[in-house]
Image (cartoon, helix red, strand yellow):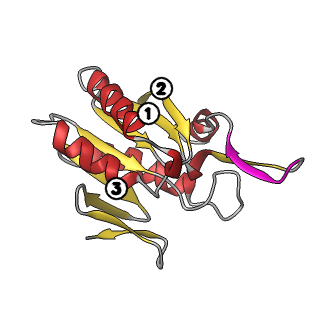
Amino acid sequence: MRVTVLTTGGMIEKMYKERDGSLRNYHTILPKMLDTFRLPDLEVMVEQVVFKDSLEMTEDDRLRILKATQRMLLQSDAVVILRGTDTLEQTGKLLHRELRNLQIPVVLTGAMRPYKFRDTNALQNVTEALLAARLVSPGVYVVMHNRTLRSPGATKDPEKLTFTKA
């Protein structure tokens, strides 16, 4: 199976810098994550589309994500998009509206805590997204915290720190 993972930054890829106390997107950490997985029959292609915090994401950035996804539809068996969770819902709605007659799954995932933090949920969510990409029917999904939700219809619950069905 061939999966394209589009990275866009967000909390999942933020890094803490001790020198200045900042928590920012510096570079993708996806290859480090993938190196910890055993994926014998999965070919993973990685493309960095944008790289910023979800709250800084603009409509132009979302259109870049859409265009990158459209390019990968014919080259992949599934597309996984690493996103910040604060505006992930808007990206899901755009993809659902614009990607008509999907023949493969498009899966969005993110994390509530950065990969580098001890109590991260990043590895769990990337693992679940890769598995869901193999198992779900064509469509747009949000996958995290042991849930696979259709998009639109998935919304961030700031109280529970997860996504729920709207």
* Amino acid type at image mark 3: Glu
* Amino acid type at image mark 2: Glu
Which is closer to the viewer, label 1 or label 3? Answer: 3
Residue at 83% from the left image edge and 54% from the top image edge: 21
* Depth order, front residue of 63/11: 63
| Residue 31 seen | yes
Is label 2 in a helix, a strand or a loop?
strand
* Depth order, front residue of 35/26: 26
Q: Earlier in the sequence, mark 2 or mark 3?
A: 2
**Residue range highlighted in magenta:** 20-25
Q: Which residue is mark 3?
A: 89
Q: Earlier in the sequence, mark 1 or mark 2?
A: 1
Quarter of image, res 5: top left
Q: Which residue is mark 1?
A: 6
Q: Is residue 53 above or below residue 77?
A: below
Residue at 62% from the left image edge and 60% from the top image edge: 120
